[in-house]
C-alpha cells in the first residue's frame, strides 16, 4: 500500500513535462539562493570601461562578462542571478500573503454563510471588478513603489481567488457526514475549520497557489517594467527590462536575456502546476 | 427581462464599492489633499482655505462622497492637475484607442484560439496537438512587455515591416470622427491610410492577444473533446453527416459555451494587459494615460482611469453573461 504522497509523486513523475519543469525550477531557485557566491561581480558595480559589452557568444564578446553588460556597465549575469532573489522572493511572498488570509476569509465565509459570508463575498466582488494589475497600480499609487509595497499590491490582487476557492470547497465539504460526526463529538469551530475541513480543500488550493506564484512573478515583473515595482539599482528581472527599450537596436541581449529568464521561470512553474493538477485531481486528467 | 433586471441589481453594490475605492484613492495618498490635488507645495494659507471650501473638503466624508457620486452621475470626473482640462474629455478622446486595441486582440485571440483548439482536438494525440498545446503553454507564460519588445525588435527594427509606435502614419492627417482609427482611416480618400492604420494595430494586437489566445485554444480543445464524446455526435456520425458539418454545426455550438465564459474573463486580462502594451507601443490609450499620470502625480486622472476601467470590465462581463443566456438556453430559465 502506497502512502498518498508516494501515489502523488508517481503521478507527478509520470508527467515528463512537469518533471523537467521541476528540475529547471529547482535550478533557478538554487541559482537565486546562492547568487552571492555564484555571481562573478557585484550586481550594482558599474564597469565604466565596458558599457554594453556583448555576451561571449556574440561578436566582440569575452569571457570577462559571459552574458555581457548593460548600459551602465553592470554585469548582466550577476544581475540576473541576484534578480532571481527579488523576483522569485516577491512571487513567493505575494502567494503566502494572499493564501493565508484568503483561506481564513474563505473558511469564515463558508462557516458563517448567513452573517459574514455575504459581506466577505461582496468585498471580494469589488476587488475582482478591478483587473489585478490595476488593483496593484491602485495600491502603489497610495503606498508608493518599492519591494514590500509590490508584494502587498500583488497579494491583494490575488486574494479574491483564494477566498472564493476556499469558500466553494468548504461549502461542499460542510454537509458531509465526517464533519457532522466531528461536530457531534464536540469539536469547536476553529478545530472544525482548520483540522477537519481544510485538509480536504487542499487540492484546488495547491494548484491555484502554484498558478498564483507564476502570475505573481509576471505581475511583479510588469510593475517593475512600468517603473512602479522594485526600484533601481536593486536588480529585478522586470525592472531590468524597463530601460532596455532604448537599446533594442544596439544591444539585443539587454532585452532578450532578462525576458528569457522570466519566461523560463513562469513556464516551469506553470508546467509544474499542470502536473500538480493532474496528479491531485484525477477527474480533470481524463479530459486533458 | 426580469433576469436582466436582477443581474443589474446585483451589480449595484459592486459599482458603489468601486466608486468608494476611487473616492478613497485620492484621500489615502499621503500628504495634504489640496497639495496632492494641486500638485503644489506651500500654497499660501488663504488660497489653501479657499480651495478647501471650494472643493468641499471641510465637509464630513460621507457628504464629500455623495458630492463625488453626484458629480459622477453628471459625467464630471474632475480636472487634470497637469493639463487643467476636464478628465472626462481626455478620457473620451483616448478611450476608443484602447477599445480598438482590445477588440483587435480579442478578435485575433478568438479566431486563432478557436482554430488551433479545434485542430488540436480533432487530431488528438498527434504531433499537431502536442505542438499547439506546447505553444499555448508558452503563450500563456509569456511576459507581455517582453513579447512586445521582441516583436518590435524583429518586425519593426530588423525587418522594417511594421511601424514602431502610434496609430497611423502622420502624413495621412486622418480626421477624427469616431476615434476608432480603422473607421476614421477608412473614410480617408487615400486607401493607404487604412492600410497604415491596420499595420499600426497589428503588432500591439498580437502582443495583447497572445495570452488570451492560449487560454481560448486550451479551453476550446478540452471543451471540444468532451462534446465529441457525446451521444448526439455519434448519432450524427451514424446518420452519415460529413465531418465538417458535425464539427462546424453540432459540436462547435455546444463547445462554445464554456469558451464564451472564458472570453469574458479574458477581458479583465486584456484591459490590464493594455496598460503594458500601450506603454511599449506608445499607444495613446487609457493605459498609457494612467501610467503617465502616476509618474506626474496627476491623481484625478488615475482615479478616473481606474474607475472607468473597472466599469468597462463590469459592463463587458454583464454582456457576456447575457450572450451566454442566448447561446445556452438552459441558463435562460433564470435559475443557476
Image (cartoon, coloured by chain):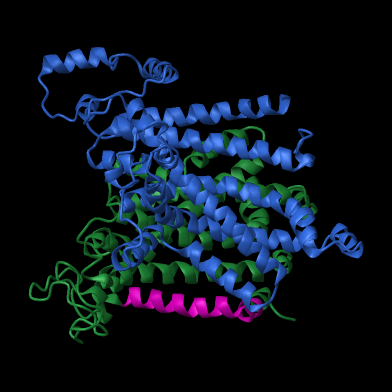
Chain colours: A green, B blue
Q: Position of residue B259 (x, y in %)?
A: 65, 52
> Looking at the magenta stretch, what is its main secondary structure?
helix
Q: Position of residue B160 (x, y in %)?
A: 31, 63
The residue under the point 43% across, 19% down is: B69
Q: Which residues are magenta?
A: A9-34
**Seen in the image, is B207 located left or right of residue B55?**
right
Classify B322 as above or below B84: below
- In the picture, the quarter occupied by the N terminus of chain B is top right
Label count reads: 0
Between B20 and B60, the one lying in front of the other is B20
Between B259 and A97, the one lying in front of the other is B259
Query: Would residue B237 be seen by someone viewing this image from the given angle?
Result: yes
Q: Give the farthest residue toward the bottom.
A: A63
- In the picture, the quarter occupied by the C terminus of chain B is top right
The residue under the point 76% across, 60% down is: B247
Classify B258 as above or below A274: above
Query: Would residue A144 be seen by someone viewing this image from the given angle?
Result: no
Between B288 and A275, the one lying in front of the other is B288
**Seen in the image, is B245 located left or right of residue B216?**
right
**Is A20 part of what is drawn in magenta?**
yes
The residue under the point 67% across, 59% down is: A200
Q: Position of residue B220 (x, y in %)?
A: 66, 59
Between A64 and A37, the one lying in front of the other is A64
Q: Position of residue A240 (x, y in %)?
A: 27, 63
The residue under the point 12% across, 17% down is: B45
Classify B257 as above or below B300: below
**Seen in the image, is A113 located left or right of residue B206?**
right
**Is B280 part of what is drawn in magenta?**
no
Q: Give the farthest residue toward the left.
A: A49
Amino acid at each position: 500500500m502506497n502512502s498518498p504522497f508516494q501515489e502523488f509523486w508517481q503521478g507527478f513523475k509520470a508527467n515528463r513535462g512537469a518533471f523537467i519543469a521541476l528540475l529547471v525550477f529547482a535550478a533557478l531557485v538554487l541559482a537565486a539562493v546562492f547568487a552571492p557566491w555564484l555571481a562573478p561581480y557585484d550586481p550594482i558595480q558599474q564597469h565604466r570601461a565596458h558599457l554594453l559589452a556583448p555576451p561571449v557568444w556574440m561578436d566582440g564578446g569575452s569571457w570577462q562578462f559571459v552574458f555581457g553588460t548593460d548600459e551602465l556597465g553592470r554585469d548582466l549575469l550577476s544581475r540576473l542571478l541576484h534578480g532571481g532573489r527579488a523576483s522569485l522572493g516577491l512571487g513567493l511572498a505575494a502567494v503566502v500573503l494572499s493564501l493565508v488570509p484568503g483561506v481564513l476569509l474563505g473558511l469564515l465565509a463558508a462557516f458563517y454563510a448567513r452573517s459574514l459570508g455575504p459581506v466577505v463575498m461582496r468585498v471580494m466582488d469589488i476587488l475582482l471588478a478591478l483587473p489585478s494589475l490595476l488593483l496593484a497600480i491602485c495600491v502603489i499609487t497610495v503606498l508608493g513603489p518599492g519591494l514590500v509595497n509590490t508584494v502587498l499590491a500583488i497579494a491583494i490582487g490575488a486574494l479574491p481567488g483564494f477566498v472564493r476557492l476556499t469558500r466553494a470547497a468548504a461549502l461542499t465539504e460542510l454537509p458531509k457526514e465526517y464533519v457532522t460526526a466531528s461536530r457531534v463529538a464536540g469539536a469547536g469551530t476553529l478545530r472544525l475549520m482548520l483540522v477537519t475541513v481544510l485538509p480536504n480543500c487542499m487540492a484546488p488550493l495547491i494548484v491555484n497557489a502554484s498558478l498564483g506564484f507564476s502570475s505573481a512573478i509576471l505581475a511583479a515583473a510588469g510593475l517593475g517594467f512600468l517603473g512602479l515595482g522594485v526600484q533601481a539599482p536593486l536588480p529585478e528581472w522586470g525592472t531590468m527590462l524597463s530601460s532596455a527599450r532604448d537599446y533594442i537596436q544596439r544591444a539585443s541581449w539587454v532585452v532578450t536575456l532578462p525576458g528569457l529568464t522570466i519566461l523560463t521561470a513562469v513556464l516551469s512553474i506553470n508546467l509544474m502546476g499542470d502536473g500538480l493538477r493532474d496528479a491531485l485531481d484525477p477527474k480533470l486528467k481524463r479530459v486533458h | 427581462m426580469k433576469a436582466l433586471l436582477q443581474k443589474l441589481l446585483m451589480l449595484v453594490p459592486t459599482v458603489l464599492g468601486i466608486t468608494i475605492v476611487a473616492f478613497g484613492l485620492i484621500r489615502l495618498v499621503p500628504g495634504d489633499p489640496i497639495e496632492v490635488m494641486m500638485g503644489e507645495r506651500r500654497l499660501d494659507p488663504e488660497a489653501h482655505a479657499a480651495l478647501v471650501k471650494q472643493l468641499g473638503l471641510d465637509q464630513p466624508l460621507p457628504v464629500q462622497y455623495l458630492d463625488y457620486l453626484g458629480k459622477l452621475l453628471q459625467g464630471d470626473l474632475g480636472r487634470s492637475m497637469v493639463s487643467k482640462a476636464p478628465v472626462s474629455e481626455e478620457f473620451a478622446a483616448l478611450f476608443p484607442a484602447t477599445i480598438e486595441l482590445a477588440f483587435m486582440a480579442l478578435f485575433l485571440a478568438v479566431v486563432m484560439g478557436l482554430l488551433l483548439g479545434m485542430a488540436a482536438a480533432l487530431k488528438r494525440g498527434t504531433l499537431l496537438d502536442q505542438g499547439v498545446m506546447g505553444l499555448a503553454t508558452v503563450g500563456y507564460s509569456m511576459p507581455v512587455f517582453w513579447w512586445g519588445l521582441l516583436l518590435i525588435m524583429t518586425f519593426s527594427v530588423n525587418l522594417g515591416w511594421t511601424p514602431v509606435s502610434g496609430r497611423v502614419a502622420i502624413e495621412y492627417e486622418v480626421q477624427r470622427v469616431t476615434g476608432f482609427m480603422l473607421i476614421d482611416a477608412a473614410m480617408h480618400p487615400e486607401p493607404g491610410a487604412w492600410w497604415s492604420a491596420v499595420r499600426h494595430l497589428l503588432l500591439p494586437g498580437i502582443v495583447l492577444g497572445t495570452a488570451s489566445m492560449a487560454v481560448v485554444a486550451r479551453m476550446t480543445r478540452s471543451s471540444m473533446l468532451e462534446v465529441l464524446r457525446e451521444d448526439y455526435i455519434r448519432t450524427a456520425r451514424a446518420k452519415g453527416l460529413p465531418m465538417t458539418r458535425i464539427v462546424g454545426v453540432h459540436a462547435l455550438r455546444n463547445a462554445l459555451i464554456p469558451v464564451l465564459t472564458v472570453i469574458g474573463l479574458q477581458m479583465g486580462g486584456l484591459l490590464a494587459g493594455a496598460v503594458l502594451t500601450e506603454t511599449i507601443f506608445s499607444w495613446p490609450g487609457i493605459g498609457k494615460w494612467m501610467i503617465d499620470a502616476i509618474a506626474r502625480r496627476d491623481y484625478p486622472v488615475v482615479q478616473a482611469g481606474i474607475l472607468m476601467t473597472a466599469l468597462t470590465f463590469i459592463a463587458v462581463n454583464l454582456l457576456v453573461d447575457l450572450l451566454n443566456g442566448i447561446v445556452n438556453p438552459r441558463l435562460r430559465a433564470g435559475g443557476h
